[in-house]
Image: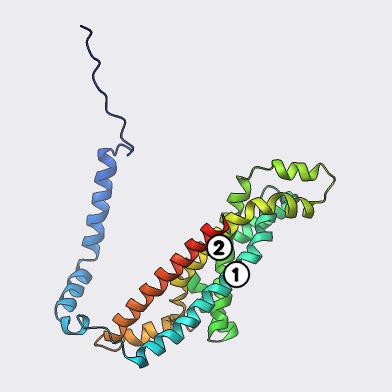
Amino acid sequence: MSATSPIKCPPSPFPKLNFIGLSLTLLAVLFILYDNKEEIVRNLSLVQGNYDKYLVAPDFSVKVIKQITSYFIDTIEIAFLGTLLGAVIALPLSLLASDMGGVAFVTSLARVFLAFVRSIPLIFYGYIITKFFGLGVVSGIIAVMIYSLGILSKQFIDEIANLDDTVAHSVMSTGAGRFQVFWYGLLPELLPNFLAFSLLRFEINIREASILGVVGAGGIGILLMQYGSMPPYNKLWTLIVFFFIVVVAIEILCRWTIKATK
């Protein structure tokens, strides 16, 4: 009778956490809590003393719904046009900043420029641009456009780097120029992923553009400030419910569009 070999469990997919790492993480959490203990206690006491302001039913009156819908349309316009323009500009800039850009100096310059663009938060762009172009939706569109081209360019560059350039070399062997190689050899393979990245960015920009109203760049953020300063917060709850419905609907639409293009 042969001895059966013991059954071995497969290795854990999770990395082994050492004691020092866990201890440092715990100490960091305790330090943050201790450093903000007075603010935490104050906030808890404020919440306990204002239940009647927070625990209220949403206001679904026609007037409130019309107002929220109007500002949400502005937010969607900001996110859509800003993302579209940002994606269109990011595409050629990403090609210049990739290894296929050709001239090393131009490639380095494009990479530095795009790294600088995406290092600045969207809310900063909104604040700065409203100083030049004034308050309103146009400033929000420009802010989202600049921010989107910085973020999308990074994703586009990575996608170009991982591209199988067999088709591009085949087109190049026919004597085609650089633009023809890109247009016929690279773009058909890149376009589906470019579209997916752009739609994902649009979905994210819906949420991020909603705060631009705080700096006067249009959108639902204007109502957020108004409703947040007018207790009881029944209108604020309506805004939150409406925001959830719109974001989920746009996410489903974006996912359907990505599947339809594959």
Residue 178 falls left or right of residue 62: right
Residue picked out by circle 1: 84
At horizontal 18% and vertical 77% (from top left) the residue drawn is: 47
Residue neighbourhood size for the residue with mark 2, other residues' Cα within 10 Å, grouped as few (<14), some (14–19), many (≥20): many
Q: Percent x, y for residue 119?
A: 53, 62
At horizontal 29% and vertical 43% (from top left) the residue drawn is: 21
Query: Between 54 and 181, which is closer to the camera in this rendering?
Result: 181
Residue 37 falls left or right of residue 185: left
- Three-letter amino acid code of the residue under disc 2: Ser
- Residue 165, compared with residue 35, is above or below; it is above
Residue picked out by circle 2: 198
> Is residue 178 visible to us here?
yes
Q: Percent x, y for residue 11?
A: 31, 31
- Three-letter amino acid code of the residue under disc 1: Leu
Query: Between 127 and 217, which is closer to the camera in this rendering?
Result: 217
Which secondary structure lies at badge 1?
helix
Q: Quadrant of residue 153?
A: bottom right
> Is residue 108 visible to us here?
no
For the residues labelled 2 and 1, say whether their Cβ atoms are less than 8 Å apart.
yes
Give the position of the C terminus as an image quadrant: bottom right
Residue 82 falls left or right of residue 123: right
Q: Percent x, y for residue 131?
A: 56, 83
Rendered image: mark on residue 222: none
Residue neighbourhood size for the residue with mark 1, other residues' Cα within 10 Å, grouped as few (<14), some (14–19), many (≥20): many
Q: Percent x, y for residue 77?
A: 53, 78
